[in-house]
Image (cartoon, rainbow, N blue to C red):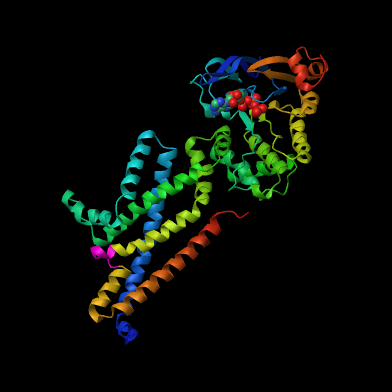
Amino acid sequence: MIQHLNFGDLLPYWDVFARGLLFTIVLTLTSTVAGLTLGTAGAWARTFGPRWAGALTRAYVEIIRNTPFIVQLFFIFFGLPALGVKLSENTAAFIAMVVNLGAYSTEIIRAGIEAVPKGHLEAGASLAMSRWEIFRHIVLKPAIMNVYPALSSQIIIVMLGSAVVSQISAEDLTYAANYIQSRNFRAFEVYIVAALLYLLLAIGLRALLRGIGRAIFPKG
Amino acid sequence: MSLVSIRDVRKSYGAQEVLKGVSLDTGRGDVVAIIGRSGSGKSTLLRCINGLETYQSGSITVDGMAVGDGKTDLRTLRRHVGMVFQQFNLFPHLTAGENIMLAPTVVVKEQKGEARAVAESLLEKVGLAGKFDAYPSQLSGGQQQRVAIARALAMRPTVLLCDEITSALDPELVNEVLKVVERLASEGMTLILVTHEMRFARDVGTKLVFMHQGRVHEEGPPKALFGQPATPELAQFIGVQP
Ligand SMILES: Nc1ncnc2c1ncn2[C@@H]1O[C@H](COP(=O)(O)OP(=O)(O)OP(=O)(O)O)[C@@H](O)[C@H]1O
Ligand SMILES: [Mg+2]
C-alpha cells in the first residue's frame, strides 16, 4: 500500500534532474558518435584490414563482450591510475562507453559488411577501384543500412547502460536521482521520475535514429 | 597484333582443372561470342582477363599489359577492361547517375560536373535519359543492365567483357539490352561476350568460340560455324545435324 505520494518534494531539485538529464544526453550522443566510428574501424579491420589488425580487433571484441560493463568502467577509472593514467569521472565514463559500443558495433557492422553481395565488390574491382575505395564507397553504406535496426537497438542499450557511470560519480541522470533521494528520502517518487525520463530519452533517441536513417538511406 | 591475347591458359580449382590450355586472340573491334555448356569454363576465362581470377600457367595480355604475372598493376589493367555481369551488380545506395559517376570521380579523379555530363550522355546512349536520379530498385532488370553497361563505358575501356548479361532478364527485356550491345559493336567497341543468345552471336559476332570441357573446342566465323559445325559437340549444342 503506497501512502502519501508526494512529488512536490522533488520540485526543489528540478535543476539537479535537469543537469543529470543533460549529462546523460551529451554522454550518449558523443559516445555514440565515437563508438560507431570505432566500430566502423573495427569492422573494417575484421573484413578488409590486414590480418594482424583483424586478430587484434577480434581479441578486443571478445574481451569487451565477455566482461561486465561496470567492471570495464571500474578498470578504466580505478585500475588505470596504477599505470599512471589518471582520468576524470566524466572522461572515464566517456571512454568506457566508447570502448563498449565500439566492440558491439564492430560485430554488428561486420555482419552488415558480410551481407553485401560479393558481386558488388567485384563490380567495384572491375571499375579499377582499390580495396579501400570499394570499402568506403561501395560497402560501407549498404552494410550499415543492412544492420541499422540492430545498431539502433545497441545504441539504446548503451544509453540505458550509461546509468552505471553514476557508480564512479559521473553526474548523470541516475547520479542525480541518487543524490535527490539521499536528501529527501522520496525513493519511490525519485526513481519513478528517473525511470520516466529514461523512457522518454529512449523514445526520443529511437525517433532521432529513425529520422537519421530516413535521411541518409535511399527509400525504395 | 591482337588486343587481347590468351595463350595456353590453365586454371584449376583444387584438383579440378577448369581451363585446360585455352588460347584465344581478340583483335581491335572484334566481337567475340563465347558459347558452351554450363561448367565449360566460360565465366572463368572471362574473369581471368581482368584479373578477377588467377590462373596457374600460360599468359594473357591486354593491349600489351600482361595479366596475372604479378607485375602489371591490376588497377591499371582494369581501367582498360570493362566488365558487365549477369546480376547487374549496381550499387543499391547510389542512383543510376551516381553509379556511373563513381569510378570516374573516385578512380580517375574527374571533376563532378564533367563526370555528370558524361554520365548523362551515357544514359542517353543506352536509352535511359531522364533516369539519372532513379535508384536501381526503381528500375526494371533491363534498365539496370543498361545502367551497368553505361557504368562500364564511363571508364572508356578498350575492351568490354560481358558475362551472360541477358540471362537474368525476363525474355521481353532481353532485346533492349542486346540492342545497346549491338550498337557498341557497330561503333567499333571490342567485345568479348559469353552468351546464350545464339541469334545474337551469329548476327553480331565477328568470331564464335565454342568452349567444351575447359577447352576451345571450335572457333571461327559465326555464320560458318552455325551453318556447318565441324564437331559433333558443337552440332549437338546448337541443335543441327553435322
Ligand atoms: N570459385 C570456384 N570454386 C570452385 N570451383 C569453381 C569456382 N568457380 C567455378 N568453379 C567450377 O569451374 C567450372 C567452370 O565454371 P564456369 O563458371 O567458368 O562455367 P561457365 O561455363 O561459365 O558455366 P555457366 O554457363 O553455368 O555460367 C565449373 O565446374 C564450376 O563448378
Ligand atoms: Mg558462367
Residue A55: x and y in percent read 35, 37
Write the start and end of the magenta stretch as one range: A165-171
Q: Nearer the viewer, residue B197 or A171?
A: B197
Q: Nearer the viewer, residue B169 or B204?
A: B169
Residue B30: x and y in percent read 72, 22
Q: Is residue A166 one of those drawn in magenta?
A: yes
The quarter of the displayed image where residue B55 is located: top right
Q: Answer with the quadrant where ligand 2 appears in the image.
A: top right
Residue A12: x and y in percent read 30, 83
- Identified at 70% across, 48% down, the residue is B131
The quarter of the displayed image where residue A169 is located: bottom left
Is A106 above or below relative to A49?
below
- Identified at 69% across, 37% down, the residue is B168
* Residue A116 seen in render: yes
The quadrant the C terminus of chain B occupies is: top right
Q: Nearer the viewer, residue A81 or A148?
A: A148
Left or right: A189 as drawn, with respect to B8: left
* Residue B46 seen in render: no
- Identified at 58% across, 16% down, the residue is B9
Residue B48: x and y in percent read 58, 23
Left or right: A157 as drawn, with respect to B185: left
